[in-house]
């Protein structure tokens, strides 16, 4: 996220003395993910971020990947995931590979008080249902349905919900989320041709800056293990920070669709790119306006990418019998296309209300035991006339 931001109180220069009222020094920390060669943020803490008092035995949280044939179209009922747990314990990984995990969650605990740090992955948390606040060491961000929350690796956070009916679609990426290069100027400004603008990005505000000592547990994930670290200082003790590495929110409802006279290819819907995958947002829009246009997508042979669609709202024009929260997986190597009748149905239509999040991966996705529990059987036969 190469857009500079600052919050709270910081010294005039980096790496110089910065004193508290009592004459002690604030502790500076640099947070970055790709060594010292990419975006970073400098934080100033009441206490050093290193005051560890105990580390409990790590717990294995590896996804339960199954040994299955992968070149089979699949369909999963995401809303069949049982509501349980908090923002972290509710997560069930359903798909994944060496570049990312895709998880579903239906947390029904409003606020568990857990502090969490994902030290192995950057997260995109899509809020399908639920309102609340993302509390982070760099400030808080209020969220509502339709928000994508981007939480960079290593940022300590909590999620608190207003109610107990919440649905999340989560992508854990082992590389950072970036806006597509073609959306950006040489110096990183979002260009006029991009469907996203800087004003659409909601950065952290309301820094808590808690000056307290005690026993604070932070759950840290690394190498698919969850470590419970005990710290002496409060995880939200930052008095100020500046830089380009921080969490932010982008609502799918702010994504401005690009339309044309004839069918536009999927890259016009792109939101982010990471190593070996991209994400897209399908949003309500006017349909193609050539007098003979077919708004439904053409059949296509996605030879080099697995396509995952998470259905959020509206009728999805190319699919029959799709419900909110469903996930379809169209694997690489075999053609896919509109369901029977969808092409004919789309001709002459003026607009669509469809809302969906797509993830296209360039390596095959594996399927977990939890995904099989919510699978709609024989989806691959549903094109049969
Ligand atoms: Fe497709």
Image (spheres, grey):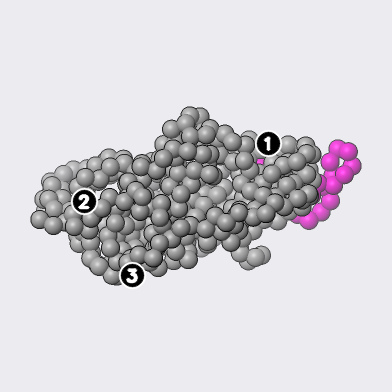
In-image side of 71 versus 279 (left or right): left
Q: Residue at x 89, y 42 (%)?
A: 23
> Who comes first in sequence, dot 3 or dot 1?
1
Q: Quadrant of the N terminus?
A: bottom right
User: What mark, if any, has residue 318 been given in the picture?
Assistant: 2
User: What mark, if any, has residue 54 been given in the picture?
Assistant: none
Q: Which residue is mark 1?
A: 208
Image height of 231 relative to 337, above or below: above
Q: Residue at x 52, y 41 (%)?
A: 87
Q: Residue at x 73, y 36 (%)?
A: 210
Q: Residue at x 40, y 62 (%)?
A: 66
Percent x, y of residue 208: 68, 36
* Most common SS among magenta residues: loop
Q: Which residue is mark 3?
A: 304
Question: How much space separates mark 3 and mark 1, taking CA atoms?
Answer: 46 Å
Q: Residues within 10 Å of mark 3 (few under 14, many from 20)?
A: some
Q: Secondary structure at mark 1?
A: loop
């Amino acid at each position: 996220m190469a857009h500079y931001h600052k919050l709270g109180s910081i010294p005039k220069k980096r790496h110089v003395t910065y004193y508290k009222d009592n004459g002690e020094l604030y502790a500076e920390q640099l947070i970055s993910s790709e060594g010292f060669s990419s975006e970073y943020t400098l934080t100033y803490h009441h206490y050093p971020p290193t005051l560890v008092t105990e580390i409990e035995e790590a717990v294995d949280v590896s996804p339960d990947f199954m040994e299955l044939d992968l070149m089979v179209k699949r369909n999963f009922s995401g809303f069949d995931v049982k509501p349980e747990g908090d923002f972290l314990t509710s997560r069930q990984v359903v798909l994944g590979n060496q570049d990312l995990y895709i998880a579903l969650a239906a947390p029904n605990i409003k606020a568990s008080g857990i502090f969490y740090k994902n030290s192995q992955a950057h997260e995109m948390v899509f809020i399908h249902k639920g309102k609340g606040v993302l509390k982070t060491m760099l400030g808080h961000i209020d969220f509502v349905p339709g928000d994508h929350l981007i939480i960079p690796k290593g940022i300590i956070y909590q999620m608190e919900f207003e109610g107990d009916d919440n649905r999340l679609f989560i992508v854990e990426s082992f590389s950072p989320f970036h806006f597509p290069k073609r959306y950006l100027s040489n110096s990183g400004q979002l260009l006029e041709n991009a469907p996203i603008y800087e004003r659409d990005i909601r950065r952290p505000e309301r820094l808590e800056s808690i000056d307290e000592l005690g026993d604070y547990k932070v759950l840290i994930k690394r190498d698919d293990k969850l470590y419970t670290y005990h710290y002496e200082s409060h995880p939200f003790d930052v008095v100020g920070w500046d830089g380009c590495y921080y969490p932010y929110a982008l609502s799918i409802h702010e994504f401005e669709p690009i339309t044309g006279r004839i069918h536009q290819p999927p890259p016009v819907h792109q939101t982010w790119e990471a190593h070996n995958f991209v994400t897209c947002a399908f949003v309500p829009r006017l349909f193609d306006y050539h007098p003979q246009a077919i708004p439904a997508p053409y059949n296509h042979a996605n030879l080099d990418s697995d396509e995952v669609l998470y259905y959020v709202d509206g009728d999805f024009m190319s699919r029959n019998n799709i419900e909110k929260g469903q996930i379809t997986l169209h694997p690489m190597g075999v053609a896919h296309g509109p369901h029977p009748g969808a092409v004919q149905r789309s001709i002459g239509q003026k607009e669509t209300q469809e809302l969906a999040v797509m993830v296209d991966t360039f390596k095959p996705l594996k399927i977990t035991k939890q995904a099989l529990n919510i699978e709609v059987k024989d989806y691959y036969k549903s094109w049969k006339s």
